[in-house]
Amino acid sequence: MDLASAKVIGAGLAAIGVGMAALGVGNVFGSFLEGALRNPSAADGQQGRLFIGFAAAELLGLIAFVIAILILFVI
Amino acid sequence: MAAEGSGIDPMHQFLVEPMLGRHLVFHGYDISFTNSALFMVITAAVLWIFMLGGMQRKLVPGRWQAAVEGMTGFVSNMMDSSIGPKGKAFTPYVFSLFMFILFANLIGLFPMGIVPGWHPFTVTSHITVTAVLAFVSFGIVLLVGFAKHGFHFFSLFIPHGTPKVMIPLIFLIELASFMVRPFSLGLRLFVAMTAGHILLDVFASFVVQGINAGGGLGPLVSVLSFIMIIGISALELLVAAIQAYVFALLTSLYLNDAINLH
């Protein structure tokens, strides 16, 4: 296998991580809604924590994206 | 533009180039006025106009004043809930950070491409810009932490109730997670904006290429891609707001660490 095709395959594998982050972000918002619908009066106070969780989960997917970009354009 | 020829070049939109077509070199440094600088000036000008138009002291606010007060109230509420009364002093900084990032993100999404030869430039899609913002935040956290607590600031790295044996290990882990903050802060904003704009550009290229391809399938791809662009644009507006909010929120949380030490 030459380097060019290996690069493309590697970038495609790195894209799996972005999909995993989608699972994580969905889990964050899903769990929040699950809790919020049980106790709507407490939901507004937890919005900050919701977005912290969202940011943490999303960051990992974004890093996978950065790796894909690095593989494609830098190496 | 990006869709010229048959290849897709989604990275072209992020090119920083001098406005007047030639580079201005001063002692070996390129100091020409670039499109990045232009859009930062535009962002600052729009922000300035927005704030100046709304800063009236009417008892019953008009629409504009209500918009500005909504923004200031939002940020000062956030500071209040994450830091407490001591966070009042840092509200102006976090507010300017939030508004600058929000306006830069939104102006980057502005459909300027309908004028041929123009294209908007997203200032926050460059890590040079977001990293500087993140380092300023991190620098303020360090300054405030050391000025307020001195070397006691290092106790931030040892959570309460850590067993004695675990202290060196926990200290190293907490130190690493503290030092990586500015990078993750800058990287998150930069990558979120870059990824969204690449996605928009790729789908826009599909529209053009579908029309050029002709046949039965080409226009179908074009129409589907165009519908997709509308959806992604809405998503990008949401992401622009969320990323600005997350940046401001994380800055306020880091400031909380420095001010209140757990």
Image: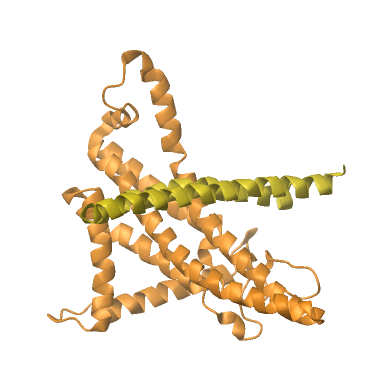
Chain colours: A yellow, B orange
Q: Quadrant of residue B60?
A: bottom left
Query: Residue, x 40% and y 19% (percent of image)?
Result: B168
Q: Quadrant of residue B50?
A: bottom left
Position of residue A9 measured from the top left corner of the image (x, y, whole percent):
76, 47
Q: Residue furthest left?
A: B59
Position of residue B99 measured from the top left corner of the image (x, y, whole percent):
37, 66
Which quarter shows the N terminus of chain B?
A: bottom right
Q: Residue furthest bottom?
A: B115
Left or right position of B55 against B5: left
Query: Does B159 appear above or below B189?
Result: above
Query: Residue, x 53% and y 51% (percent of image)?
Result: A22
Q: Of residues A28 and B142, which is closer to you in this image?
A: A28
Q: Residue furthest front?
A: A38
Left or right position of B226 against B211: left
Query: Does A75 appear above or below B175?
Result: below
Position of residue B7 measured from the top left corner of the image (x, y, whole percent):
79, 68
Query: Residue, x 73% and y 66% (percent of image)?
Result: B9
Query: Can residue B185 be seen in the rendering of this structure?
Result: no
Position of residue B245 measured from the top left corner of the image (x, y, whole percent):
37, 59
Left or right position of B6 against B131: right
Task: Report the number of numbered marks.
Answer: 0
Query: Can residue B147 be seen in the rendering of this structure?
Result: yes
Which quarter shows the C terminus of chain B?
A: top left
Q: Residue furthest right?
A: A1
Query: Residue, x 27% and y 74% (percent of image)?
Result: B68
Query: Does B119 appear above or below B179?
Result: below
Left or right position of B140 against B226: left
